[in-house]
Image (spheres, helix red, strand yellow):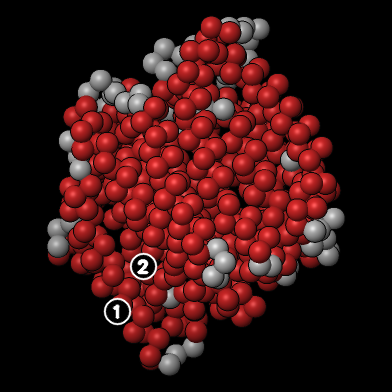
């Protein structure tokens, strides 16, 4: 029988394949669309997306995580959450529909009324998809996600590009999002065997919500906090400023989300099953931090030091103002795995109360920094997010010193070799710019040289995560023979 370590790695590969496949297609499509559409189009949809994203948090209500965390969740639990979500999503969409004119008035843009109402339909679709996702995550069958996401992303890509070419502007972006989620949900519904039964229990709902409401509150705080900068930029500055800010954030966020969500989605259910064994949870947390930072550091440092060439080649000079934001966000997101690994450990141990307290503390710190910087400039707001992120690492890791015996200092020691090697790689890669070659040739050389330096450096320094990844690949190959 497949052991836990190999099962985690196998599911991690499927989850990574699903995320990387979807994100690769999305990334290519975003490049094509960015060349066709104007920054103002991206800024317009970003104004609406802020509100939809916040409402989207309520779709889960924390119940999805509660289903994953509960040891003996059965059909009664899953069916109860399914029907609760459907009813709740209908109510949410009615609120969105009625409040759409207020969103338009807030930004002094009447076109946002229709966009908000159409994009709000994603809330209804998510209500159907939510429990299927929880079922897949709980049972570690991430292969199902791969096909659903792939078909949804490819279909949406075709629709978005065709509409953009034919002059639909911002509506190409709206339709792309809606089509993607619809196809994703339909495919997942037909590939996952679970179906809601005619079962409902208020008692079970209360039990699940007693755990889930704290995660819901944490998610609301986190989502509002993460999107409030976009809201303020759109209100205080311009839609173009918002577009450059978001585009600078998009590429590093895309990479980090791809890797981190793969680890996150596999790690939480696995940790939850081992919640009574603190040593195992600690080892999983440590491995997640070391491995993900080992992968993330060279990608983020490499992207930061090649940012001018990347933006010029992929998006053209009309997006040049996004380069400074790209550099700031590369540093911000490089440390993101430390956040999620620590928080997953806390959730897996059933300490959702502690999770909520941490979120409140972090957000107070972040809001203070935001209030100080919001009237200075958009760049000042981006830097406030970086500073807040660094402080949040310390806050997130503090409880695990007591819960798991794994302190923030110990975590820094684990990732320091990867960070130092990535910085050295980035500096060397940047020097290639002074060879005065063409932009494309310069970038190709930078990527090749960076990869060679990092891999050879990891081998020479005998970095633990490098050896771990190689050993797991070998085990995977042997298991398939």
Query: Foreground: 84 or 100?
Result: 100
Query: Foreground: 456 or 331?
Result: 331
Q: How many marks?
A: 2
- Above or below: residue 90 compared with residue 414: above
As drawn, which residue projects farthest toward the bottom?
A: 436
Category of crowding for the residue at label 1, using alpha-carbon neighbours closer than 10 angstroms: few (below 14), some (14–19), many (at least 20): some
Q: Is residue 159 left or right of residue 256?
A: right
Q: Position of residue 347 (x, y in %)?
A: 37, 30
Quadrant containing the N terminus in the rendered view: top left
Q: Which residue is located at x 63 percent, y 55 percent?
A: 231
**Can you identify the residue that label 1 sits on?**
428
Residue 445 appears in which quarter of the rendering? Answer: bottom left
- Above or below: residue 83 compared with residue 438: above
Residue 443 appears in which quarter of the rendering? Answer: bottom left
Quadrant containing the C terminus in the rendered view: top left
- Above or below: residue 217 compared with residue 16: above
Earlier along the polypeptide chain: callout 2 or callout 1?
A: 2
Query: Foreground: 150 or 363?
Result: 363
- Which element is circle 1 on? helix
Query: Foreground: 241 or 11?
Result: 241
Q: Which residue is located at x 66 percent, y 64 percent?
A: 236
Q: Which residue is located at x 38 percent, y 91 percent?
A: 435
Q: CA distance from mark 2 to mark 1?
A: 11 Å
- Which element is circle 2 on? helix
Q: Is residue 422 left or right of residue 54?
A: left
- Above or below: residue 25 compared with residue 51: below
Category of crowding for the residue at label 2, using alpha-carbon neighbours closer than 10 angstroms: few (below 14), some (14–19), many (at least 20): many
Q: Is residue 404 left or right of residue 304?
A: left
Q: Position of residue 118 (x, y in %)?
A: 79, 44
Residue 434 appears in which quarter of the rendering? Answer: bottom left
**Can you identify the residue that label 2 sits on?**
301
């Amino acid at each position: 029988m497949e052991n836990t370590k190999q099962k985690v790695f196998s599911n991690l590969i499927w989850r990574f394949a699903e995320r990387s496949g979807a994100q690769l297609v999305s990334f290519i499509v975003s490049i094509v669309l960015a060349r066709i559409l104007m920054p103002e189009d991206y800024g317009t949809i970003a104004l609406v997306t802020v509100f939809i994203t916040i409402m989207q948090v309520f779709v889960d209500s924390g119940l999805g995580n509660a289903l994953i965390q509960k040891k003996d969740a059965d059909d009664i639990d899953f069916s109860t959450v399914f029907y609760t979500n459907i009813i709740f999503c209908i109510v949410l969409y009615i609120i969105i529909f009625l409040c759409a004119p207020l969103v338009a008035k807030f930004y002094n843009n009447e076109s946002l009324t229709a966009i908000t109402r159409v994009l709000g339909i994603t809330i209804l679709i998510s209500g159907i998809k939510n429990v299927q996702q929880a079922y897949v995550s709980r049972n570690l069958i991430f292969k199902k996600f791969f096909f659903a996401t792939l078909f949804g992303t490819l279909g949406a890509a075709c629709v978005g590009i065709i509409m953009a070419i034919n002059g639909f502007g911002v509506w190409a972006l709206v339709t792309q999002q809606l089509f993607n989620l619809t196809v994703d949900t339909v495919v997942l519904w037909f590939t996952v065997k679970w179906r809601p039964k005619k079962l409902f229990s208020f008692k079970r709902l209360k039990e699940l919500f007693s755990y889930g409401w704290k995660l819901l509150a944490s998610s609301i705080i986190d989502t509002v906090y993460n999107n409030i900068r976009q809201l303020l930029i759109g209100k205080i500055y311009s839609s173009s400023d918002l577009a450059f800010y978001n585009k600078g954030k998009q590429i590093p966020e895309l990479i980090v989300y791809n890797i981190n969500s793969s680890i996150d989605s596999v790690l939480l259910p696995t940790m939850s099953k081992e919640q009574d064994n603190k040593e195992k949870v600690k080892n999983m947390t440590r491995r997640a931090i070391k491995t993900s930072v080992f992968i993330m550091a060279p990608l983020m440092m490499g992207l930061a030091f090649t940012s001018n060439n990347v933006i010029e080649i992929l998006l053209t000079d009309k997006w040049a103002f996004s380069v400074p934001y790209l550099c700031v966000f590369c540093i911000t997101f490089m440390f993101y795995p430390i956040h999620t690994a620590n928080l997953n450990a806390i959730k897996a141990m059933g300490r959702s109360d502690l999770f909520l307290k941490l979120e409140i503390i972090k957000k107070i710190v972040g809001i203070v920094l935001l209030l100080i910087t919001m009237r200075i400039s958009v760049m000042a707001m981006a830097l406030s997010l970086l500073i807040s992120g660094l402080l949040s690492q310390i806050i997130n890791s503090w409880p695990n010193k007591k819960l798991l015996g794994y302190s923030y200092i110990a975590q820094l020691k684990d990732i320091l070799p990867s960070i130092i090697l990535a910085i050295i790689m980035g500096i060397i890669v940047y020097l290639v710019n002074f060879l005065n070659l063409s932009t494309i040739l310069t970038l190709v050389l930078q990527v090749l040289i960076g990869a060679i330096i990092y891999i050879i450096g990891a081998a020479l320094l005998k970095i633990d995560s490098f050896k771990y990844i190689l050993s797991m690949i070998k085990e995977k190959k042997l298991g398939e023979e």
